[in-house]
Amino acid sequence: MVSPHAEPYAIEKELRRVQSLLKLEQEEDLAQFKLKNAKASIQERQQRGLTWYPVTITSEDVGFGGKVVLELERPAGQQGLHLFQVGKNAALFGNIPGRSATDRPTLNGVITSVRRNKLMLTTTKEDLPDWVTEGGKLGIDLTFDEVSYREMDYALGKVMGAYGDRLADLRDILLGAKPARFRAEKADDLFYPSPLNESQLAAVRHVQAAQDVAIIHGPPGTGKTTTLVQAILETIRRERRVLV
């Protein structure tokens, strides 16, 4: 963490360090993914929740940019837990007779819907490859999630490049280059009645006085969540939107 009253260069240096560490984490994450799953059988991947097999194509449509969108369904008897979620990268594969496991053809895409034993896969292609209809059984694998890392890297780039705007202010405050600002707290400035004790009410007033950021902290069981709910109610009265 950058020390208080850090210079802009120190902040940029710290963020670039975070960016390089994120890259290392991505590389290690990918290596571990390959180590655990590259040589695993279909059955092993099913047990880990990474594969649906077999699946059937129950509908085919054209989505944004002319890309093929497939609805896939696994057998009703397969009720095991899985890791398939909206936004995850996945690949339809063909278990083609005469082809080895490493030679299975694949069709990459992104999951856009998951409901019971069905999911929607928005593919990267405008036409289905021939192997999909060659007669072999189909399955779908989760693939390594590069999207999250791209989004994190993009966010870091936005933060590093911010200048003269609210994002730049929050970056400098959170990394210690400038202090957070607070309005004068008023004892009678709370609108909603509540059963909070004095220390909790003081925390709510502290939140309301914050112009940038405020922290509610305390030992377990001291009512931090209850205090936060009260602070949200008070904030809604003053602001149009609250992100929780």
Image (tube, rainbow, N blue to C red):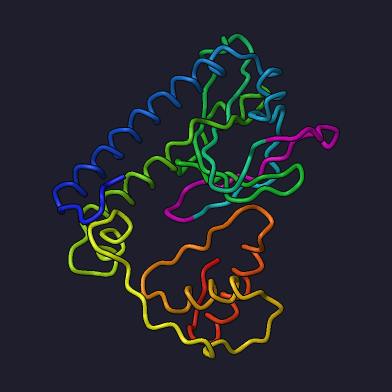
Front-most of residues 101 and 199: 199
In the rendered structure, the answer to whether residue 154 lies left or right of residue 13 reads: right
Image height of 21 relative to 222, above or below:
above
In the picture provided, is 82 more to the left or to the right than 9? right
Residue 112: percent from the left, percent from the top? Answer: 58, 50
Give the image quarter of residue 42: top right
> Residue 172: x percent and y percent?
25, 59
Q: Is residue 3 above or below residue 164?
A: above
74 in magenta: yes
Residue stretch rendered in magenta on the structure:
64-82
Task: Tell me which residue sits at (28%, 65%) in the image.
Answer: 179
Front one among 168 and 202: 202
Q: Name the image quarter holding the C terminus.
A: bottom right
Q: Residue at x 52, y 86 (%)?
A: 187
* Residue at image point 54% right, 75% down: 202
- How many numbered circles does the render carry? 0
- Residue drawn at the location 52% of the way across and 23% of the way down: 105
| Left or right, 167 with reference to 29 | left
Position of the N terminus by quadrant:
top left
Give coordinates of residue 6: x percent, y percent. Answer: 19, 52
* x and y percentages locating residue 174 in the rendered image: 33, 57
